[in-house]
Amino acid sequence: MTSSSGRPSITELRAVAQPEAVVGRVSGEHWAGRLYQRRVSIFITRALVPTRVTPNAVTWTMLVTGPLAALAMSVPHLWGPLVAFAVIQVQGTLDCVDGELARWRDQRGPSGIYLDRIGHYVTDGCLAVGVGVHADGGLGAIGGWTALGLAAGFLILVTKAETDLVHVARVQSGRAPIADTAEVARPRAGLLRRLRRIAASFPFNRALLALEMTLLALTAAAVDASRGGLGATRVLDVVLLVVAVLVVVGHLAATMASDRLR
């Protein structure tokens, strides 16, 4: 029941703001959201319900945190990736809050979805560049490692475009929206289906996502701090580029061989 303060109960709010159709999405809900961020975000959403804060205002805040995390990531010291990791935790929670607030108020619209997508594009791409700058020794020593980070960041943008352009292609061809389910995403061809199953068992593609990337960068920075130098971060820089290449090629092949474009 809604309290005298104008705030709904947590149970009432969850029923509307965190429906299974949202938290159960195959590619739209991060594991951290299901594991702990949704447990925190619902209380923030409840606090914002009676205020004038709009869902888009929360999304704008989320969007700003991405470049800030990338800037922290570029600092060639342990505390740089540590701050980046903390900022991305905040961003992930805000990413839950904006949608929850929009669903509760029934203020869902294309502008919020657009800003949310831009936020993820900017964050993941910039973080890869930040890893490269860190590997070079900071903003004052930009060189070849930064170039690798830029290449990885570009390919990360391509992987995200591959996903979003499925929906664009369906709309522009007059087809109905398609459900985000494992069955629809599964390739029809036997070989690709087996390769996708193997990839699902070893989800290396997650290294390109903000939370996982900052966690890997924090681990690499801790190794560098204990051993001296920037060797571990430079290895990570190369790994991110290799993973990005594999994901771009694999995602394109899997999409073309699935029912997503049929």
Image (cartoon, grey):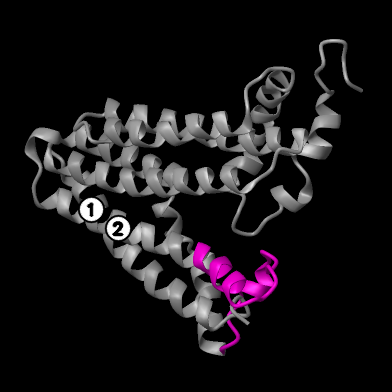
- Identity of the amino acid at label 1? Leu
Q: CA distance from mark 1 to mark 2?
A: 6 Å
Residue 181 is covered by the magenta coloring: yes
Up-down relation of residue 67 to residue 184 (above or below): above
> How far across and how far down the image is residue 106, in percent?
76, 38
Up-down relation of residue 51 to residue 110 (above or below): above
**Callouts 1 and 2 close, C-beta under 8 Å:** yes
Q: The N terminus lies in which quarter of the figure?
A: top right
At x 62%, y 34%, the residue is: 98
Q: Which mark is residue 171?
A: none
Q: Residue furthest bottom?
A: 190
> How far across and how far down the image is residue 180, in percent?
66, 64
At x 42%, y 44%, the residue is: 210
Which residue has dot 1 on it?
150
Towards the viewer: 230 or 85: 85
Give the secondary structure at mark 2: helix
At x 37%, y 40%, the residue is: 214
Are there few (<14), some (14-19), or many (20+) residues within 10 Å of tag 2? some
State left or right for residue 201 relative to residue 11. Answer: left
Q: The C terminus lies in which quarter of the figure?
A: bottom right
Q: How many numbered marks, from 0 up?
A: 2
Which residue has dot 2 on it?
154
Give the magenta range.
Answer: 164-189
State left or right for residue 140 relative to residue 40. Answer: left
Q: Quadrant of residue 102?
A: top right
> How far across and how far down the image is residue 188, in percent?
60, 86
State left or right for residue 13 relative to residue 92. Answer: right
Are there few (<14), some (14-19), or many (20+) residues within 10 Å of tag 1? many
> How far across and how far down the image is residue 184, in percent?
66, 74
- Identity of the amino acid at label 2? Phe
